[in-house]
Amino acid sequence: MTSSSTNLSLVDTDPAELPVDAIVIGLHSQTGEQDATDGPAGTLLLASGAESIAAAFDGRLTETLALLGATGAPGEVIKLATLGTVTAPLVAAVGLGAEPTGAAPAPETLRRAAGAAVRSLAGAARVALTLPLPDDADAPAALRAVAEGALLGGYRFAGYRTRPQPSRREPVAEVLVAVPDAGDAGAQAEVTRAQAVAGAVRLTRDWVNTAPNEKRPPAFAEVVADAARSAGLGVEVLDEAALAAGGYGGIVAVGQGSEAPPRLVKLTYTPEQGGSGKRVALVGKGITFDTGGISIKPSQGMWEMKSDMAGAAAVGATMLAVAALKPAVAVTGYLPMAENMPSGTSYRPGDVITMYNGKKVEVLNTDAEGRMILADAMARACEDGCDYLFETSTLTGGQVVSLGKRISGVMGTPELCERVRSAGDEVGEPAWPMPLPDDVRKGMDSDVADISQVNAGMDRAGHMLQGGTFLREFVTDEVAWAHIDIAGPSYHTGEPTGHLTKGGTGVPVRTLLALIEDVATHG
C-alpha cells in the first residue's frame, strides 16, 4: 500500500490573484510596538509574503484572525473565508511563533508550519504557500524547508479500508510555493531536491506503515530490490541458503524461527565521476516483525513492532534518493531482514552463534535480535570496504528512556557522531551523541564466548549503550562509524504535528542524505 503523491511547483504571481482553493500565510505572535502595515499592536503580526492579502482585507486581517482565536503559536492553523476579497476562497494563517529579530524564521519552523498548514487543508485540491523566505544566503535552506514540509505534512498512508470514510478528506493534490522568481534555476533546483528527499521519506513511511503480513523478509526484499533496479542501483539479494553458506550466523539465527526466511539486500551506487574519493556504507535494521522470539514481548503494544524494520526502510529509501540526486561519492546500502518469531526452530537463550566476522556470541535474550543481524551486515560492509559507516536501527527501548521520542541516540567514532548531530540539527532530525564506556563492555563479557549480546547479568542499566557497545565489536579499526538508535523517533504514536503524521516518520532519511552530501563535498 502506498500514499498518494503531492505535486509541488513554484509561482511568482501576486498571491491575492492565485487561482487556488486556499492560500497559506504566516502569522507571528507579537509583543512589540504597533504594526503599521496591519492593525494595532498586541498579539499578532503578519509574516512577510502576505502583504497583498493584508491589503485586500483593508488592514483588518490580523484583527479578524485574533477574533477567531489566533495566537501565532508555532503550528497553529486558523482558517478564514475570504468572501471574495482575494481569488482564493480560503485563507489559512499558520503560526510561526515570535518574529525573529533581524532574521527569517528558522528552517525547521518553516518546515513544521508548511506541514501543519497543508495537512489541515485536506480536501482542497490546490493550495498556495506564501511563507516568509529570506533574500540572502539563507534563502535556499528556507525554500527547501517549506517545500519538504508541504510534501511531508500532506502525507497520508493509503491504508486498507474497503469503503471510504465520509470524514476522511483527500490530502492536498497540488502545492504552489510563492517565490520572488519562479524561473530562478537555484530555486528550481531546491524544489527538485526537496521532491527527491521528501519522496524518500514518504516511501520510508509507506514501508513502515505496511502491515507486517505483507512485508515478511522475502516480500520486503523483493519490493526494495525491484525499486532499486528501476532506479539504476546495483542489487544483490542473499537468500537463506546463501546466508548460511556465507557464514551470516546472526541473520540466520534470528530468522530461523520463522517460516518466512531471512534476506540480506545490498544496494550499490557508483558516482559517474569526481567526488571526495570516500566510500560511505549505510546499514539498516530490517526486523519485519519482532515478537521477541523465545524471550517473548508483552502483548500490549506489540502491533507497533511492524515498525522494527524502520532502519532498513530508511536505508533503502535513502539509496533511491541517492540514485536520483547523484552525489559525487560511492554509497552502498546493506539491509539485513528477518522476522523474529517463537517456534520449535527459534534460536534460544544460551545458544552460541558464529558471526560473519568469526566472533562467537552468547545469546542471553532473543529479543536483542536487532544487533545480531546488524553485526553481520556491518562486518560485511567493512569487508567490502568503506571509509564511513552509518548504521540506523530501532535498537533499544533505552533510547526512548534516555532521550525521548524525538531525539535519536548516536554512538561510535566521536568525530563522526558529532557530524551526525550537526546534520540532524540542519535538517530537523535531532540526535545526541552518547558514550560507550569501558564498564559497559566489561558487563558483556561471556564465560563461554567472545561476547554476550546483552549485559551478562541481564542488567538493563545503560541499555542503549549496550547496543552500541556490542555493534562496535563488528567494525574494523580503520572505519569511522556511527550507530543511530531511532527506537523513538522512527514511529509517531500521537496526533499529527508539524510535518509528522501518525505512524512511520521517515527518520533518519534526511539526516543520512545530508551526511552523504557532506561527505561528497568535504570528504
Image (cartoon, grey):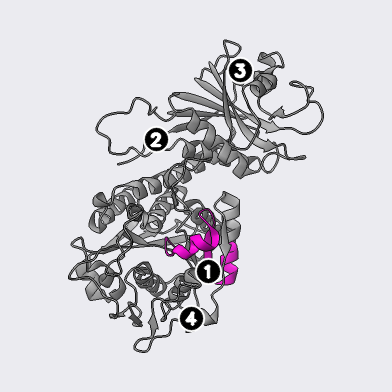
Q: In the rendered structure, which segment of residues is drawn in magenta?
A: 392-419
- Give the camera-side residue of 237 and 25: 25
Instruction: Examine the structure image and report whether residue 411 is included in the region drawn in magenta.
Output: yes
Q: Residue furthest top?
A: 84
Secondary structure type for disc 1: strand
Q: Nearer the viewer, mark 4 or mark 2?
A: 4
Q: Residue 366 vs residue 500: left or right? A: left
Label 4: which residue?
441
Circles 1 and 3, Cβ within 8 Å, touching? The answer is no
Identify which amino acid the numbered label 4 is placed on: Arg
Secondary structure type for disc 3: helix
Work out whether mark 1 precedes mark 2 in sequence or the reverse, and give the earlier one: 2
The residue shown at (40%, 58%) is: 311
Q: Nearer the viewer, mark 1 or mark 3?
A: 1
The residue shown at (41%, 44%) is: 202
Q: Position of residue 508 (x, y in %)?
A: 48, 54
Work out whether mark 4 precedes mark 1 in sequence or the reverse, and give the earlier one: 1
Identify which amino acid the numbered label 3 is placed on: Ala
Q: Residue 434 vs residue 354: left or right? A: right
Circles 4 and 3, Cβ within 8 Å, touching? The answer is no
Work out whether mark 1 precedes mark 3 in sequence or the reverse, and give the earlier one: 3
Label 2: which residue?
5
Question: Is 49 placed above or below 509 here?
Answer: above
Q: CA distance from mark 2 to mark 3?
A: 26 Å
Q: CA distance from mark 4 to mark 3?
A: 63 Å
Label 3: which residue?
16
How many residues crowd mark 1 within 10 Å: few (<14), some (14–19), many (20+)? many
How many residues crowd mark 4 within 10 Å: few (<14), some (14–19), many (20+)? many
Label 1: which residue?
411
